[in-house]
Amino acid sequence: MHAVKHTMILGMTAILMMLVSNVCLGAGIPDKVSISSIQKYYDPVSFNHAAHINNLKDCGLCHHHTTGAQVTDPNCARCHKNSGAQATVSCKGCHTADPFTPEALKQQRDQQPPIYHRDKPGLKAAYHASCLGCHQKMSGPTGCQDCHKRNDGGDALFKSGKYAPKAPAKPKAAHH
Amino acid sequence: MIERRDFLKGCLACGVTAATVSVAGTSAMAAGSFEGYPDAMGVLVDLTRCVGCRSCEAACNNEQKLPEPDLPFDDLSVFSEKRRTTEKAYTVVNEYKVADKDTLFRKIQCNHCTEPACLSSCFVNAYTKTKEGAVIYDASVCVGCRNCMIACPFNIPAYSYSSPLNPLVKKCIFCYDTRVKDGRPPACVEICPQQVMTFGRRSDLVKLGHDRIQANPGKYVDKLYGEKAVGGTSWMYLSSVDFDKVGLDGHIQNEPIISNVKDFLGFVPMVLSIWPALFTGVHLLATKNKDGHHDHEEGDHQ
Ligand code: SF4
Ligand code: SF4
Ligand code: SF4
């Protein structure tokens, strides 16, 4: 029973995927996405979008309902079961890079109707929730620098590499 | 020299403030009735999201211009012990084994209580609860008595011992003067890759916290830690396991700590008003024999 349902869902997703790619994506789907939102501390990530599409086949895993994929989260499904593909699909199209500025907080407070999307993570958290959350489940890489190499600014912040503390705790203890 | 003069000045100040405290003490508000400033900000901490990357520790060190740490912030060996906040680290992340394989991380810092025990225990009035929600302090009046350290239910205030005669309280100030005062989120909140911390108006966060519990059945224990604890805190927590398992006292009282000491405080002012004088006296006696010039020098400068 469960298996049948599963195959059905897979089949439906496949059809949807084909439909979707014919309808609105095609040339619009980037094979690579360069993510540089924390370049102060880390080199940009060159995200292999094409490989992830091949591996996962389900756009909705990352793009929720926006590509027209069937949403599984019951909270989302209440409104977006049939809401179809949207004009905005990129992460940064909806998730703001600075979610806690006074303006962003005010916008969230004033939004109408006031009950939906109130707990929407910022861009950085959205990336990490999607990437890291999935990598943890599917045994993908999970170390910080597995995805983005820390640069000089990051080393300085983390007091690591050439900025590592010169006098470690040990010699200090030796004085006593 | 300088330190000693500061100390003496401090003592004079205590004499004066102790008197004011005694007045404030008698008109003490009914503890627990203070709802907090309406626009006070807060932080909702979701323990299920933290991955223990220690970025928040690094950001705090940088923002607060704290001394160099003993180990780099990417060194994960620190998780082998349970750390507490120190004069060099206003926030630390600890790891808790919560089940066979599961661990949760918790970032520790001042919770910015609505009715702070540190504030009510301080007899020189070093602490202030700002309308933005931050509990800040004026280190220049701190006499290093460590009352606040004992009073704080979360074991937060630390002391700098670099100057033995002038130990100053050190703790997280909610990034008040560099950020929260201007409505910007604290450095640790901003850098966190997982948005473990949600910054916003405290009253909104209480609602958001309960909404998140409701929207994710089975994910969280049905409690927003800090909504009521010790009269409410600005930093509040969501967890997937009992709070005792992550080093937070799940049975902590809902009344502010001041309720415990209120009666006691009624007696204190008298003691306090003679205490500084006593200190000064002892101090003078102790130093006079060693170096008689000091008093002349002090006199000359004043
Ligand atoms: S930065 Fe965020 S995820 Fe990393 S240790 Fe701190 S609270 Fe946890
Ligand atoms: S957590 Fe401790 S130091 Fe922070 S406001 Fe509360 S009593 Fe004061
Ligand atoms: S709020 Fe500011 S001072 Fe407090 S722990 Fe975070 S970065 Fe440090």
Image: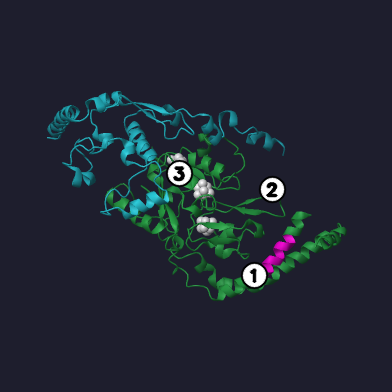
Bin the neighbour count of mark 1 within 10 Å (Cα to Cα): few under 14, some 14-19, many 20 and up: many
Determine if marks 2 and 3 fall on one subunit: yes
Q: Is residue A65 above or below residue B157?
A: above
Q: Identify the mark at residue B190; answer none if there is no mark.
A: 3
Q: Tell me the SS state at disc 3.
A: helix
| Tally of numbered discs | 3
In contact (CB < 8 Å): disc 3 and disc 1: no
State the hue of chain A: cyan
Magenta highlight on residue B168: no
Question: Of circles 3 and 1, which is in front?
Answer: 3
Residue B231: in sight, yes or no? Answer: yes
- Whether residue B153 appears in this view of the structure is no
- The residue pinned by badge 2 equals B162
Establish if B175 lies above or below B103: below
Q: Earlier in the sequence, mark 3 or mark 1?
A: 1
Across and down, in percent, residue B199 comes to 42, 50
- Of the pair A126 and B77, the residue shown nearer to us: A126
**N-term-proximal mark, 2 vs 3:** 2
Give the class, few, some or many, for how many residues have Cα within 10 Å of label 3's Cα (few <14, many ≥20). Answer: many
Q: Identify the hue of chain B.
A: green
Front in this rendered view, residue B260 or A94: A94
Tell whether B152 sits left or right of A51. right
Q: Is residue A143 above or below residue B126?
A: above
Mark 2 in CB contact with mark 3 (< 8 angstroms): no
Identity, as a three-letter code, of the amino acid under mark 3: Glu
Image quadrant assignment for residue B194: top left
In this rendering, position of residue B102 left or right of residue A51? right
From the image, tell me which residue sits under label 1.
B18
Residue at the spot x=42%, y=58% of the render? B251
